[in-house]
Image: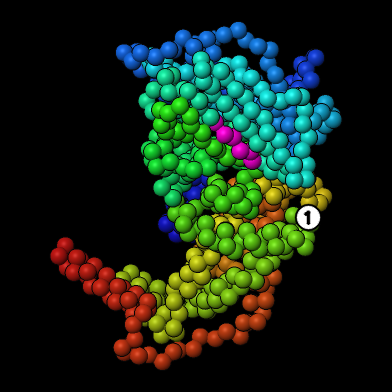
């Protein structure tokens, strides 16, 4: 192994160690159920942090405008009525509304379980078994600056509910309307929610009647202040895919939280929607009629929790709503709280599908996204129509991808076969001109040209495959279809690592504490594949080092991703065997030369000759 190869492996190893350390799993502990508890409220924002969190609007100095703000003060600080909670359930969600602020209190997704749902103490309790996405006892507030410069947040105001009972069940084509009204002098602030059967989304109308004497700055904000609940066991992995974003100017702008920093991004003008998401779920708010005078504000930070054993991200998102200072104004919003499911999000027709992050190649998402959207995801969904188990879908999927890539792979293998046959001749050149590296380079290029071999022929087809492989990586990492889906044998969940042994301690430097069965199988198949394909003695280290590196790297990856690459390697071994036997009689045959021929080989020859001349000239000058 030459010096450059050694340096490359050292760098790869160093990068791998740092990456594994930063992304090592940090599992959460299941919430402890206190005696007497009947429901679970999974809060992820510490109370003191929530109280000090900045608001989208800030207080102004008291204005001189004459306005009756006492009525507003009475509405906000009057006697607190008992909290009224209304529960609404359809086939997809079970949610709670509260009269305190007219907010959404909790939002349970009936088709999605928490990671600890199978534990005996939680398995029979709906409120602890199902995924719940709303933090801190409620969200979806109205914030504005009053005429006397005070910041007003209606989150704790006692709204009057229109609900006649505490529980509603809707099904078929039914819908339910619940309104919350806050009287202010001769006017009011009114929120009206409309929920439909078989829908994760709700419509919310906000009415301002006779509020022109109370609201300043010609605007109010619709605020989702407490982010989204973290619901996966590995909080570090969940944080990696969590963010907030705004769709403005036909472009999604993503805001990522940073550890220990307060990140803020403001948008002015038309904003089609804002969202905050974790790995698999999102809260998205969209004005039904976006205003060119609107805007948005996103704030976020990331903090360690649980004695630094876990990670949390906190986001505050708000829509700026222009207020026309009239006696009556009504604005409507679509509020989606549910899974990051591409087809489902696209069905709303508001570009919600942009929330799905398929990954990028060197930061270029426009290369990867079309491959995932128009090839991989449709194929994946088509297979699942006929194959109910996602594990078998992945196996068939990997076979189809291997067949699609076969022409490129076969071309690469044939080129590598010819390069192997050419090695003795290259060795002769190196021996003959061992004291003249420039001559070796020139004669080697001439040899390639004589036999019509492109030295990049083995690498180029592999590079062409890279966008597809990266797209697959992104797809299987975020596909909610794989969440908590079992396969066979020891593989109980395709969205998390398939653990066959818990070491009870972390491996120093590498950061993993569990052994993945599929990662081991992947390493074994990679070793066999390398053994079959690598014949150059100078590259023997690849046969051993690459399988080890990839085995370690894949220890913490989801079982679905590892299953795909394991099967892909198996099919590659079969393909390698076929190519080796079907092209065993490959011979080196000189090609007819054309003095006017161009192309890569001509450019390589020219570059080699030019390099040799420059180095010879440099040597003469030194003498």
Give the labeled residue for mark 1. Answer: 389
- For the C terminus, the image quarter is bottom left
Residue 276 in view (yes/no): yes
Above or below — where is 93 with respect to 459?
Answer: above
Q: Please state the horizontal and vertical placement of residue 560, each as a whole percent of the image.
A: 69, 51
Magenta part of the chain: 201-206
Give SS at disc 1: loop
Q: Is residue 21 magenta?
A: no
Residue 420 in view (yes/no): no
Given residues 185 and 271, the one toward you in this image is: 185
Seen at 44% across and 89% down, the residue is 591
Seen at 44% across and 83% down, the residue is 452
Using a 10 Å C-alpha cutoff, classify the residue at mark 1 as few (fewer than 14 neighbours), some (14 to 19) or many (20 or more): some
Seen at 38% across and 38% down, the residue is 293
Residue 260 horizontal side relative to residue 375, left or right: left
Q: Please state the horizontal and vertical placement of residue 339, each as a whole percent of the image.
A: 65, 43
**Figure coloring:** rainbow
Q: Please state the horizontal and vertical placement of residue 612, each as a whole percent of the image.
A: 27, 72
Residue 53 horizontal side relative to residue 469, left or right: left
Residue 509 horizontal side relative to residue 503, left or right: left
Given residues 618 and 510, the one toward you in this image is: 510
Q: Give the total of numbered labels.
A: 1
Given residues 455 and 5, the one toward you in this image is: 455
Seen at 64% across and 19% down, the residue is 160
Q: Quadrant of residue 469?
A: bottom right
Above or below — where is 29 with respect to 419?
Answer: above
Above or below — where is 27 with respect to 550?
Answer: above
Q: Please state the horizontal and vertical placement of residue 529, each as a whole percent of the image.
A: 64, 64
Q: Is residue 203 magenta?
A: yes
Magenta segment's dominant SS is: strand
């Amino acid at each position: 192994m030459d010096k450059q190869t050694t340096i490359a492996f050292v760098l790869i190893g160093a990068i791998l160690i740092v990456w594994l350390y930063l992304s090592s799993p940090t599992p959460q502990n299941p919430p402890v159920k206190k005696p007497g508890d009947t429901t679970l409220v999974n809060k992820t924002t510490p109370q003191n942090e929530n109280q000090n969190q900045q608001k989208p609007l800030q207080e102004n100095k008291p204005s001189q405008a004459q306005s009756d703000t006492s009525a507003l003060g009475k509405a906000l600080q009057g006697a607190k009525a008992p909290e009224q909670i209304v529960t609404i359930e359809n086939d997809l969600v079970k949610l709670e509304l509260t009269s305190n602020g007219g907010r959404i209190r909790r939002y349970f997704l009936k088709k999605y379980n928490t990671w600890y749902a199978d534990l005996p103490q939680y398995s029979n309790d709906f409120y602890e078994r199902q995924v719940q996405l709303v933090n801190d006892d409620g969200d979806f507030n109205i914030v504005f600056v009053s005429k006397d410069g005070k910041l007003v947040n209606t989150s704790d105001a006692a709204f009057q509910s229109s609900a006649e009972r505490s529980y509603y069940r809707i099904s078929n084509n039914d819908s339910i309307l619940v309104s919350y009204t806050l009287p202010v002098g001769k006017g009011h602030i009114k929120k009206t929610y409309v929920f439909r059967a078989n829908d994760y989304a709700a419509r919310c109308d906000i009415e301002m009647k006779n509020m022109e004497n109370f609201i300043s700055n010609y605007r109010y904000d619709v605020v989702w202040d407490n982010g989204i609940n973290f619901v996966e066991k590995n909080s570090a992995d969940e944080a990696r895919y969590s963010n907030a974003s705004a769709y403005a100017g036909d472009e999604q702008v993503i805001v990522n939280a940073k550890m220990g920093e307060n990140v803020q991004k403001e948008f002015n003008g038309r904003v089609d929607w804002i969202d905050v998401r974790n790995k698999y779920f999102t809260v998205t708010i969209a004005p039904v009629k976006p205003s060119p005078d609107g805007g948005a504000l996103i704030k976020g930070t990331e903090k360690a929790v649980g004695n630094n054993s876990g990670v949390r991200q906190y986001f505050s998102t708000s829509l700026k709503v222009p207020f026309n200072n009239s006696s009556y104004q009504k604005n409507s919003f679509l509020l989606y709280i549910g899974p990051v499911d591409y087809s489902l999000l696209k069905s709303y027709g508001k570009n919600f599908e942009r929330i799905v992050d398929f990954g990028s190649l060197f930061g270029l998402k426009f290369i990867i996204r079309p491959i995932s959207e128009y090839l991989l995801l449709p194929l994946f969904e088509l297979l699942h129509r006929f194959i109910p188990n996602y594990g078998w879908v992945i196996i068939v999927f990997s076979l189809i991808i291997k067949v699609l890539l076969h022409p490129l792979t076969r071309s690469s293998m044939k080129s590598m076969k010819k390069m192997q046959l050419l090695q003795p001749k290259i060795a002769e050149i190196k021996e003959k001109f061992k004291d003249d590296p420039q001559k070796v380079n020139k004669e080697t290029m001439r040899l390639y040209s004589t036999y019509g071999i492109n030295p990049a022929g083995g690498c180029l087809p592999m590079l062409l495959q890279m966008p597809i492989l990266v797209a697959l990586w992104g797809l299987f990492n975020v596909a909610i279809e794989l969440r908590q889906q079992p396969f066979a044998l020891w593989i109980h969940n395709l969205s998390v690592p398939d653990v066959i042994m818990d070491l009870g301690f972390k491996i120093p430097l590498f950061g993993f504490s569990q052994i993945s069965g599929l990662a081991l199988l992947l390493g074994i198949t990679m070793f066999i594949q390398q053994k079959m394909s690598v014949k150059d003695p100078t590259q023997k280290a690849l046969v051993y080092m690459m399988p080890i590196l990839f085995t370690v790297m894949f220890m913490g990856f989801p079982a679905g991703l590892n299953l795909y690459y394991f099967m892909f390697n198996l099919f590659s071994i079969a393909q390698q065997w076929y190519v080796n036997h079907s092209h065993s009689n490959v011979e080196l045959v000189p090609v007819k030369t054309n003095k006017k021929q161009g192309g890569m080989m001509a450019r390589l020859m020219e570059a080699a000759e030019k390099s040799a001349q420059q180095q010879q000239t440099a040597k003469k000058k030194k003498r």
